[in-house]
Image (cartoon, helix red, strand yellow):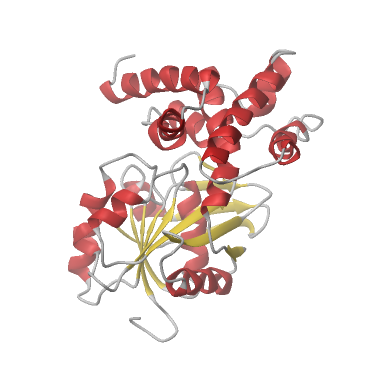
Amino acid sequence: MSSPTRPKILLFGAGSVGAVYLYLLSKVSNVTAVLRSNYDSVKENGFTINSSIFGQGIRFIPNVVRSCSEAAELDSQPFDYILICSKAIPDTIPKLMEPAVTRGHTIIALLQNGIGIEQEYADAFPTNPIVSCVVYIPATQRPAGVIKHGEIELIEIGAYPSTAPAAPALAFTNLMKVSGATAEFYEDVQVKRWFKLLVNASWNPICALSLSADVFVIQSSPLAIDVVLDVMLEVREIAQAYGYVFSREQVEFQLDRAKARIPINAGIEPSMLQDVKEGRRIEVEAIVGNPVRMAKEKGISCGKLEMLYVLAKALDVRIGTGDS
C-alpha cells in the first residue's frame, strides 16, 4: 500500500454510484476519479450529494482527471486499488485503465452490474487480483454533479474466481467498512450476482424500453407483475444450471421490493432507464445478453428474456449510432 492508513485509489466512472463511494472513500484514502461526461461540471463545482443515509447537501470536491493516463502521470506511486464504477460495456475499459495498473500490485474492484463480466479483466491483467462486487445503491445524477441517493447502500464483495486467494477481497471489504459503507464478504460472490440479476435482467430492460419507473410499469397493466415474474423465473432457471439455486420465495422477494413501493408511489429508475433518458449506451450485454448466451449453452429456454434482449439490443445500437 502507498500508505499504511491511506491507500491510493483510482475510481473509474463517477456516475451516481461512483460519486457516493468516492465521497466515502475520500475519508480514509487518497482518491482520484476518472470522469468523462461530467468532468467539466465536477471539476468546477464538485459533487453535491443528497442522501437519505449519509446526509443532505453534502458538498464534495474530489481530485478529478480525464483519463487513466493522466492519473498515472500525476503521481509516480502505484495505485493500490482501481475501482470500476462505469457501465459494463464489453471490450472497452481494460484498455482504457491499463496505464494506471501496476502489474502484480493493483487490486481491481468491479462495482458493476451483470453476470460474466470479470473474465476480460482477468485476461487483461492476469497478475492482478480481481474483486467482484454487487452493489445496491439506488441513486441518480441529474443534473451533472448532483446526486440523489435513496434508502439503501450495500456492497457485497468476493474474489474472482472464487478459488482465488481471498485476502485482496477481504482487504477491500475492510476498507469499505472503514469508509462508512455497508460491506459484506462472500466466499463465492457469484451467488449474489445471480440474485441481483433476477432484478436487473427483468426491470432494467423493461423500464428502459417503456421509459417508465418500476412502480409505473406495475400500475400500467394487470399483466405486468406476471410478466416481470416470468422473466425472473427464467433467470432463476439459468442460475440453477450453473449451480446457483434460488427458491420461488427468494424470487418473489425481489419482486416484492418493487410492489412495496406502490402505496407511496416511490418508483425507482433502473440504470438502463437513466442511461436511455440521457442518450447513453446501455449495459445490454452484461445484464441481458450474457445470461441469454449462458442459457443457450445449457439448453435452457428463456423466451421472454430473449425478446427483451433483442429489443434492448436494438435500442442500444440506435443510441450508439445517434439515430433518433
Residue 107 in picture, x, y percent from top left: 35, 68
- The residue drawn where x is 36% and y is 53% is 44
Quarter holding the C terminus is: top left
Does residue 221 lie above or below 179 as drawn? above
The single residue placed furthest to the front in the displayed view is: 299
Q: Nearest the camera: 172 or 85?
A: 172
Residue 231 in picture, x, y percent from top left: 60, 25
Quarter holding the N terminus is: bottom left
- The residue drawn where x is 37% and y is 31% is 280
Q: Is residue 230 left or right of residue 239?
A: right
Does residue 308 lie above or below 274 as drawn? above
Residue 158 in picture, x, y percent from top left: 50, 62
Confirm whether residue 66 shows in the render.
Answer: no
Q: Is residue 155 left or right of residue 298?
A: right
Q: Is residue 206 left or right of residue 119?
A: right
Residue 78 in picture, x, y percent from top left: 26, 74
Q: Is residue 33 left or right of residue 58?
A: left
Confirm whether residue 87 shows in the render.
Answer: yes
Q: Nearest the camera: 170 or 271?
A: 170
